[in-house]
Image: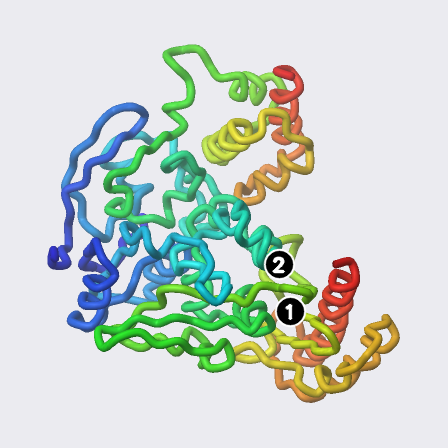
Amino acid sequence: MEAPARSRAISLEVNGEQIEMEVPARRLLVHFIRDDLGLTGTHVGCDTGNCGACTIDLDGQPVKSCMALAVQADGAKIRTVEGLAAESELTALQQAFNKHHALQCGYCTPGMLMSATALLERNPHPTEDEVRYALQGNICRCTGYVNIVEAVVAVGEEHA
Amino acid sequence: MVLLREVGYARPATIEDAVSLLATHDGARPLAGGQTLVNVMKARAAAPDVLVDLVDLDELRAIGFSSDGLLEIGAMVTYTQLMGSSEVDVARPILAEVASTIADVQVRNRGTVGGNVCVSDPTNHFPPLLVALGATFTIRAESGERTVSADEFFLGVYLTAVGEGELLTKVNVPPSSGAGDGFAGVTIGKHGTYIVDAAATVSGDDVRIALGCVAATPVRASAMEERLTGSDFSEDSVRSAAVGVGATLDPPADVHGSADYRRRLAEVSAARAVLQAARRRRAK
């Protein structure tokens, strides 16, 4: 049985790239993503697990990366907002955010995109209520929810 | 940037190793989904020396049935897993229904049943629900395994029957059979924290009612249960049986509600939960 250690060599896949790194056990996953990997698209909003700006995809599920330790992601597959669009082509959801003015300051946008992407993968044609339920963990302080919800619903309708 | 205190980390491959790590290291805490523990570590409200990550213990992620028909839910089962489980849907669908109202998608993807009950936060959903359902809890120690009832499990705020060096491995819930279950309360915001909640189960003439958020641990509304024995569970009889429940309580007062408001909510929530349970029982 391995003894407890204050750091751990972790191996994980981030946006299709294999990463091996030694990280302190106390490092939050969001700080590993932003500071160790330089993927600053994942935002730190509240740092208390409420706002959802740090939402990433961990093994196929949206989770808040400020409420996980980097060592917990050892062996996992992660996708961040940088991993959504291939090269310069935006995803249908990102284009819908643009078209429907679904962002103002943009701080919550990466988290919104990750939660909405996960919803559309599970349920390609969500109703407005389903979108609101799925985005409950993402707070927008510009209160632009109307356009955000519209954008996500529109993706489902356009690809019906 | 929030910096946590230095902490040791271990990822045991077996339950035996997990229990041994918890027993041999002072200040060791099990880490399940981390949706409470990581946050309280940020706030330095908890400062464990060693985290024993349960992530590799597949046995704790299982949902199944015991030989005597109990629904067995592993301590590492997430809310999302409960919501998608056919076993839960068949045996006790109220568990999935309540899980679907906890926090948000991201938290439900990582938060676990074991974490919900072991934190024993008075505003958590599962403590009163599991008391009403008559669940039992299986706890593993180096010396062996024991099972405690829901009435004995919740001991105080952040305090349960799981002692140092022990690990909750599963929660066992009797299948509903002919019973109907209900859960009601008033939250801060649509799916926010409960100000008061109540869980009820009605089977035959028998009823069990547990109130949440009114004391450190769930409170059985025993007098109301007695008044409802043999009841027709009509709206009038349930609402009048709830009268007096509030007066027996000494609930906390905070920015969300005074103690008197919580006493009133306790009666309203208990009546609503029982009425929902009775309606579902009749529909079976």
Q: Nearer the viewer, residue A45 or B226?
A: B226
**Residue drawn at x 29%, y 37% as measured from the top left:** A76
- Confirm whether circles 2 and 1 share one chain: yes
Q: Nearer the viewer, residue B115 or B202?
A: B202
Chain bearing mark 2: B
- Residue B109 on image: x %, y %: 45, 46
Q: Height in image: B4 above or below B49? A: above
Q: Height in image: B43 above or below A104? A: below
- Would you say the residues marked 2 and 1 are in contact, meaning their CB atoms lie under 8 Å apart? yes
User: Which secondary structure lies at badge 2?
Assistant: helix
How far apart in space, not on screen, are marks 2 and 1 (Cα)?
A: 10 Å
Q: Along the horizontal axis of the image, is A127 left or right of B136?
A: right
Q: Total marks drawn?
A: 2
**Residue drawn at x 67%, y 70% as measured from the top left:** B201
The amino acid type of the residue labelled 1 equals Ala
- Residue B51 on image: x %, y %: 24, 60
Residue receiving disc 1: B199
**Residue drawn at x 35%, y 56% as measured from the top left:** B60
User: Which secondary structure lies at badge 1?
Assistant: strand
Farthest residue to the right: give it. Answer: B236
The amino acid type of the residue labelled 2 equals Ile
Examine the rendering and report whether any part of residue B246 can be seen.
Answer: no
